[in-house]
Amino acid sequence: MKLIFLALAVVVGAVAQPKTVFVITDAEGVAGVCRQDQTDPKDTEMRQLLTGEINSAVAGFFDGGATDVFVWDGHDGSQTLSALTIDSRAHLVMGELPVSMLMDRHFSAAAFVGQHARANTRGGVMAHSYSSLGIQNLLMNGEPVGEIETRTALAGWFGTPVIFLSGDSAAAEQLKKIDPDAETAVVKEGIDNYSCISLSAEAARRLIHERAAAAMARIGQIQPYRVAGPVTIQIEYTSRHALTPDDALKSGAEIVDARTIRFHGKDFLEAWQRARP
Ligand SMILES: [Zn+2]
């Protein structure tokens, strides 16, 4: 009898364990989005394409056992998604996020939907690092990085693994390089910045749903990406954003040239907080 109770407690314990997923969304890595004009947050078709992919990922995460899914509207000022059209089981996160990106809530996993590759990626559709107009190059410990590497490192600093990415083939490759066990859904192949070979919305949604569910099944096997300290974050701005004398006074800052600044930190979070690109 005692054994049965014990077994029951173990089963109930396993079921009760929350599995929370934080989804970072963007527009440039969505199937059928390949031109700059489509990334306007008010573009009706892009909104439908993006929302469809997000809802497929949300459905996949729930099918795979997620208990809560948080979706952050991460594209261009958080004005693309709507509570009217997001999967009713998801929580919609709107607005600018703090440096922690809420990772201090220790989600079970993080994921990317609609993700693009970093700046200067050959064959990356609209590849950029945070700001296509403002940032020429972003380096972490001397290596080129973009949103994928830095946000995966941020999640990793808080002990959260990135388990899934949907986007173009270049973006998927870049996640795999630092997070080889993550599931990816490649929805288009980039030819160059504004040319691609895309899946249909329907095919992309099917693939995302399937891979997102598969990713959930692997929580626990996928390790958080931890960057050993000390860490440098170097921002090379575009020529329209030269540095000012005040930049030299920022903590941990080293001026490299007229439009390049390097921030030093004892670990990723400290360097990242100082840089805030
Ligand atoms: Zn982006």
Image: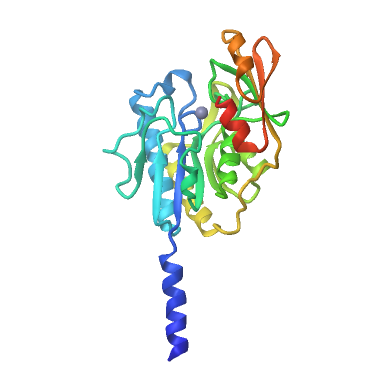
In the displayed structure image, the side of residue 130 where residue 44 appears, left or right: left
User: Does 51 sit above or below residue 110?
Assistant: above
Q: Quadrant of residue 155?
A: top right
Judge left or right: residue 182 versus residue 35.
right
Q: Residue at x 68, y 36 (%)?
A: 266
Residue at position x 44%, y 33% from top? 97
Q: Position of residue 151 (x, y in %)?
A: 56, 37
Q: Position of residue 197 (x, y in %)?
A: 54, 30
Nearest the viewer among 71 and 262 is 262
Q: Going by the picture, which residue comes out furthest to the right?
A: 142
Q: Position of residue 67 (x, y in %)?
A: 39, 57
Q: Quadrant of the N terminus?
A: bottom left
Please provide percent x and percent y for residue 113. Answer: 48, 39
Asked whether 113 or 263 is in front, the reply is 263
| Rendered residue at 62%/52% (across/down) | 223
Could you tell me which quadrant the C terminus lies in? top right
Q: Residue furthest left?
A: 84
Say which quarter of the image contains residue 137: top right
Residue situated in front as seen by the camera: 266 or 69: 266
